[in-house]
Image (cartoon, rainbow, N blue to C red):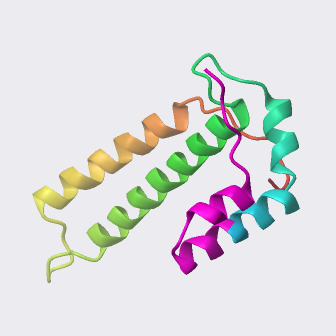
Amino acid sequence: AATTKLTVSGLLNRVEDRDIKNLVVWIDEQAHAKDLARKISESGVADDGCPVFVGRSIQNMIQRQDDQTQQNEAVQLSQSRDGNNELSDSITEQLRKLQDYHKKASSREFPRLPAGPL
């Protein structure tokens, strides 16, 4: 089966929504500015068929999102103290779980992208 390479102009011809077209153009401009095509092609391909650069980028985004979620939960918990400045048992348990999460997260091995801009 022959594969068809979709170009940005081909994609823009298929999209009708103006906001989506603007997003496609912006993504393309960012990709060119950051030389992503070269970085992706030079990174190689993982066993699952995903380019290594893309897989690492996704893992880094997931890790940042997990970290932000945990940080937000910690802030919410710290703001939900009783009037007597003591933490309830349920909040203490949630904070213990957050502490366990951070211990596990700090010991996880995530492949990191090289330093510098993407």
Q: Nearer the viewer, residue 61 or 101?
A: 61
The picture places residue 106, in percent across and down from the top left corner, at 53, 38
Q: Residue at x 18, y 71 (%)?
A: 86
Q: Residue at the far bottom: name it.
A: 83
Left or right of residue 96, residue 60 in this image: right
The picture places residue 117, in percent across and down from the top left corner, at 83, 56
Tell me the quarter of the picture where residue 69 sits: bottom left
Tell me the quarter of the picture where residue 49 sits: top right
Residue range of the region highlighted in magenta in the rendering: 1-24
Residue 79 higher or lower than 58, as above or below: below
The picture places residue 114, in percent across and down from the top left corner, at 81, 41
Residue 56 higher or lower than 2, as above or below: below
Left or right of residue 103, residue 107 in this image: right
Q: Nearer the viewer, residue 71 or 92?
A: 71
Left or right of residue 8, residue 50 in this image: left
Quadrant where the image shows the N terminus: top right
Q: Residue at the far top: name it.
A: 47
Left or right of residue 2, residue 42 in this image: right
Is 19 part of what is drawn in magenta? Answer: yes
Q: Nearer the viewer, residue 61 or 38?
A: 38
Q: Residue at x 21, y 77 (%)?
A: 85
The picture places residue 56, in percent across and down from the top left corner, at 65, 37
Q: Residue at x 57, y 50 (%)?
A: 61
Is 13 part of what is drawn in magenta? Answer: yes
